Amino acid sequence: MNNKILIVDDTKSWLVFHKKLIEQLYGNIFDITTASSAKEALSKLKANRENPFSLIITDLQMELDFDPMTAGEWLVINIKKLKEYSSANIVIISSMHNIETIAKRNNVNCVSKSMLSANKLLMRYMLEKLMPFLDKI
């Protein structure tokens, strides 16, 4: 079981929200790393190639360097180019109106921030869907 999670969001309060929510649901079984931009996240992913993250949670709207593409979509595309992350689970969590379109186009999972804020158990559902070993915890 790889228990490494990378959470990427340029808003500190969302980084804290996601991290604390996962810890509330599962205690300290995960080694959680955070990044505040897509570029920082890609750097951390590359630095952890020998022991890759099993789950990457990313926002879409972060730095504007990739316009017209969002930073989050740029990150997802670049994660998929790294062979060590070919089996990594990726979840986009964003407030963008077209989150589902972007997620489908890149074959990843998604959940809107507003839905997650309203129902924190969506995080449990998403994690157990992507990491089946969790339903035994």
Image: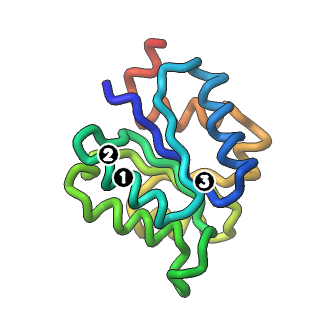
Q: Amino acid at mark 1?
A: Leu
Q: How many marks?
A: 3
Q: Which numbered disc, 1 or 3, marks the residue that appears first in the sequence?
A: 1
Q: Amino acid at mark 3?
A: Ile
Numbered badge on residue 91: none
At x 70%, y 44%, the residue is 116
Task: Confirm or deny contact between disc 2 and disc 1 (CB under 8 A).
Answer: yes
Question: Which residue matches tag 2?
Answer: 48
At x 70%, y 49%, the residue is 14
* Image height of 108 relative to 122, above or below: below
Left or right, 32 with respect to 105, comes to: right
Q: Residues within 10 Å of mark 2 (few under 14, many from 20)?
A: few
Q: Residues within 10 Å of mark 1 (few under 14, many from 20)?
A: many
Question: Which residue matches tag 1?
Answer: 45
Q: Which numbered disc, 2 or 3, marks the residue that appears first in the sequence?
A: 2
* Image height of 29 relative to 90, above or below: above
Question: Which residue matches tag 3?
Answer: 93
Foreground pick, 25 / 128: 25
| Relative image position of residue 79 (x, y in whole percent) | 34, 60
| Relative image position of residue 9 (x, y in whole percent) | 61, 56
At x 52%, y 66%, the residue is 72
Q: CA distance from mark 1 to mark 3?
A: 18 Å
Left or right, 121 with respect to 58, comes to: right
Q: Secondary structure at mark 1?
A: helix
